[in-house]
Image (cartoon, helix red, strand yellow):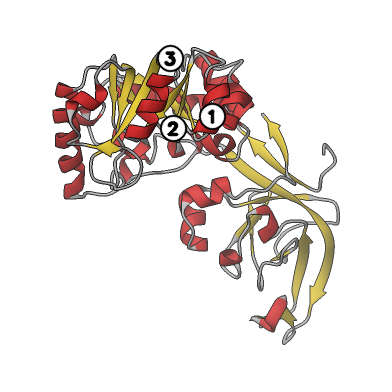
Amino acid sequence: MTDAPLRLRLDGAALVHNWNALAELSSPAACGAAVKADAYGLGAREVVRRLADAGCRDFFVANWAEAEAIADIAPAVSVLHGLREEDLPRARQWRHVRPVLNTPLQIARWRDSGGGPCDVMVDTGMNRLGMAHDAPIELFSGLEIDTLISHLACADEAHAMNAEQRARFAIIASRVPARRYSLANSAGIFLGDGYRFDLTRPGLALYGGIPCPAAEGVIRQVVRPQAQVLQRRRMRAGETAGYNATYTAPSDQELAVLNIGYADGYGRGFSDTGTVFADDIPCPVRGRVSMDLLIVDVSAADVAEGDWLTIDYDLKRAATASGRSQYELLTGMGKRYTREWL
């Protein structure tokens, strides 16, 4: 949809900068990239192409359909959700695409189907996917483990659980042979050398998210949604804007109605809290966000029907304004955007 009335301007240089910065912080550990959920909504193939050219060699997806979408351009892919019986035909297509085995049944399924290089997830305290950290060592016998993986639950805050998980992972890493060991996500990279092991797996920070205070000033914004003005109108003092009349104008205002709403991931949490920019002029959201439409105050800006305005999508600031996580803001962006790489 090259003529769509809303678009994502995606900064490829910022994406590569973020990976390079995280790779430098991770060193001497290698730095991979989580590209699940279509690279957090940006478009996995375009992200993988740019990061592979920058030197990234390890990519992480959720399922086998996501793996298939990038298998021809990614040097190595790990499928985090493991190996169902239905996944076996796909799993045997490529040697550079590996299942991340999470359960004894998945381990048995992989062995019985011929084995080969695989990754293994161990749970060190999150109680999500993974083998128990104190599972019998015999369970892993004979596996050709490329990367033994665990995941931090609280890396984005100063929490005692971080050290507990690191200690548990270090113990199992000393007992289970693997080519590499991987614990740190985006925020985990900033926890220090003891968390980086052999391979880090950033996701959010690649795409402009600020996972922890230490990332500020390091990570650059990648995503800037823009929406076209469908109408400009005047609202008189005392009139209301939007559903349920939640906003009443204290004085006459100039409004612009934009082609974006919660169906496009710009949620109702931005009602009366979000900001849109006309060039560098901030234009506050007025009233409730609709499914497909947004009303903003352009009294201070020279805005006409057909103009493009930029949604404030600094992820940390937008998360505060909307009450949603930075992850939700990225992955919730819909299919109606034209995605334009700069």
Residues at discs 3 and 2 in contact (Cβ within 8 Å): no
Where, quadrant-wise, is the N terminus in this rendering? top right
Q: Is residue 51 left or right of residue 244?
A: left
Amino acid type, callout 2: Gly
Amino acid type, callout 1: Asp
Question: Local crowd at mark 2 within 10 Å, few (<14), some, or many (≥20)?
Answer: many
Taking the spot 51% from the left edge, 13% from the top edge, the residue there is 75
Q: Is residue 22 left or right of residue 208?
A: left
Q: Quadrant of residue 257?
A: bottom right
Q: Which mark is residue 114?
A: 3
Which residue corresponds to mark 1?
87
Residue 78: % across, % down? 45, 25
Question: Local crowd at mark 3 within 10 Å, few (<14), some, or many (≥20)?
Answer: few
Whether residue 183 is visible, yes or no, is yes
Q: CA distance from mark 1 to mark 3?
A: 14 Å
Taking the spot 85% from the left edge, 62% from the top edge, the residue there is 231
Where, quadrant-wise, is the C terminus in this rendering? top right
Residue 98: % across, % down? 45, 21
Q: CA distance from mark 1 to mark 2?
A: 9 Å
Earlier sequence position, callout 1 versus callout 3: 1
Q: Is residue 264 left or right of residue 178?
A: right
Q: Quadrant of residue 294?
A: bottom right
In the picture shown, does residue 96 fall above or below 315?
Answer: above
Amino acid type, callout 3: Gly
Closer-to-camera residue (217/331): 331
How many circles with numbers are drawn on the protein?
A: 3
